[in-house]
């Protein structure tokens, strides 16, 4: 099965959570908007999102074309891919638990995004800086310890993995969360990360996974940058 | 099967999306935190969320106990209940599509919440009023037409239903979204709602469903109020 991933070509963003799953498992996939030529590029992605293009249109990227269906919403894509790529438990209770954690990751990611866009996604950061500073102060003091403390509890209780006994897509997403938080908030993370040893160890183990190590060393891995979810604005990292 | 729902007893909030599914299908359920007595009430809910209480702890309510497992995250609960309560397609592609829409509803709901809490969930509204006004202005002008326009397209293309040919949990959630938006932003909605005739008609049809009509007339239905997601602050409804 060849998977076709559609996502913005210049940011890791939400698409990266899907890329990590495809890469870790060595899946056959095409990152459509990053290619050029007929039926490729951002134009191909935009065409798929046009009204009436699909009977079941995505609201936003990322979306995945697989076996004749188009699936959107990052966590939904991952729950579809998980058992197929060997990255999720097969039994229903385990799949629901993995998905529950992934949805909590999604909630956290939305809060990360709103640290630099507390007023409107359609406004530049420099138009909402005072609000961003205020929101980020609360985010780092209250929300980060709450979310990462929760994820730490889960990983610590499960021998350092988020779900089950093998690598899962939730582990891969947690790797990206830790990497992104270190990029965006290095000062804060250097102070706080000792509180989350299981997550730090998980980050190391995922980075050393052969499929991921090779991906991280490749040009396919898009570096964090200041157009994505995790942005490094020093004034926000008190 | 008796379902046990855990959610805050005084607000519709995210729990209401689950209540609507249970009520529409006449499921046997207990709304644990709204009852009194041993093993009931908010204390019972808080106990379930305590560290080490469960091997798979919820991050936040709502959560549902069903057949020996505890499932959290509203959309995850609904995708579990959907096929069991006859409120979702049975085939995988249809289930994924219903869940994809539900996750988009969840994204919208999070944006609704942040209109009155743009800075921090832990701060009172009156501590973030200027930011709330600014965020809400953008929300009503840009985000509401984008989301509700998308949902309208989906419903209009499918004979007024969100998914499939029968009532689904996504229809029930969309009913709650329309009801909530009318409560929170009556002025704005009276101006804009003519743009979404399929959603208005869906609201009427869901309200007339026997299980829902009887629920709405009961004391089990918690009215919208200013502690929930949808709050009516006239100063935000330009």
Image (cartoon, coloured by chain):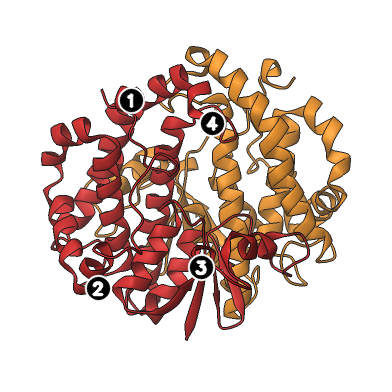
Chain colours: A red, B orange
Which residue lies most toward the front here?
A37
Residue B145 image position (x, y, % from top left): 74, 40
**Is residue B229 visible in the rendered structure shown here?**
no
Q: Which of marks 2 and 1 is nearer the N terminus?
A: 2
Nearer to us of marks 4 and 1 is: 1
Taking depth in this image into account, of B25 and B174 the one nearest to the observer is B174
Element type at mark 3: loop
User: What residue is disc 1 on?
Assistant: A236
Q: Tell which subunit mark 3 falls on.
A: A
In three-dimensional space, the C-alpha distance between marks 4 and 1, rounded to whole angstroms, equals 20 Å
Residue B190 image position (x, y, % from top left): 85, 31
Q: Are discs 3 and 1 both within one chain?
A: yes
In three-dimensional space, the C-alpha distance between marks 2 and 1, rounded to whole angstroms, equals 34 Å
Element type at mark 2: helix
| Pointer 1 local density, CA inside 10 Å: few below 14, some 14–19, many at least 20 | many
In three-dimensional space, the C-alpha distance between marks 2 and 4, rounded to whole angstroms, equals 39 Å
Q: Which of marks 3 and 2 is nearer the N terminus?
A: 3
| Pointer 2 local density, CA inside 10 Å: few below 14, some 14–19, many at least 20 | some
Q: In the image, is A35 to the left or to the right of B65?
A: right
| Pointer 3 local density, CA inside 10 Å: few below 14, some 14–19, many at least 20 | some
| Pointer 4 local density, CA inside 10 Å: few below 14, some 14–19, many at least 20 | many
Vertical arrangement, residue B176 with respect to residue A189, above or below: below
Element type at mark 1: helix
Are discs 4 and 1 less than 8 Å apart at CB? no
User: What residue is disc 2 on?
Assistant: A211
Taking depth in this image into account, of A213 and B117 the one nearest to the observer is A213
Are discs 3 and 1 less than 8 Å apart at CB? no
User: What residue is disc 4 on?
Assistant: B114
């Amino acid at each position: 099965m060849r998977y076709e991933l559609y996502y913005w070509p210049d940011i890791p963003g939400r698409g990266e959570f899907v890329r990590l799953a495809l890469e870790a498992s060595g899946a056959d996939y095409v990152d459509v908007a990053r290619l050029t030529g007929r039926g490729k590029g951002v134009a191909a992605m935009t065409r798929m999102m046009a009204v009436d293009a699909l009977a079941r249109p995505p609201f936003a990227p990322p979306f995945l074309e697989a076996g004749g269906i188009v699936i959107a919403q990052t966590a939904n894509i991952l729950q579809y891919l998980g058992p197929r790529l060997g990255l999720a438990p097969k039994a229903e209770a385990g799949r629901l638990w993995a998905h529950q954690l992934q949805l909590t990751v999604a909630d956290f990611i939305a809060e990360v995004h709103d640290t630099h866009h507390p007023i409107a996604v359609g406004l530049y950061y420099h138009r909402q800086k005072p609000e961003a500073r205020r929101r980020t102060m609360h985010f780092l003091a209250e929300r980060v310890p709450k979310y990462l403390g929760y994820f730490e509890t889960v990983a610590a209780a499960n021998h350092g993995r988020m779900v089950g006994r093998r690598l899962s897509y939730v582990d891969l997403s947690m790797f990206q969360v830790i990497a992104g938080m270190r990029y965006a908030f290095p000062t804060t993370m250097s102070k706080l990360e000792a509180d989350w040893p299981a997550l730090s160890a998980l980050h190391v183990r995922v980075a050393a996974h052969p499929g991921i190590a090779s991906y991280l060393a490749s040009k396919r891995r898009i570096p964090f940058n200041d157009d994505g979810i995790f942005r490094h604005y020093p004034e926000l990292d008190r």
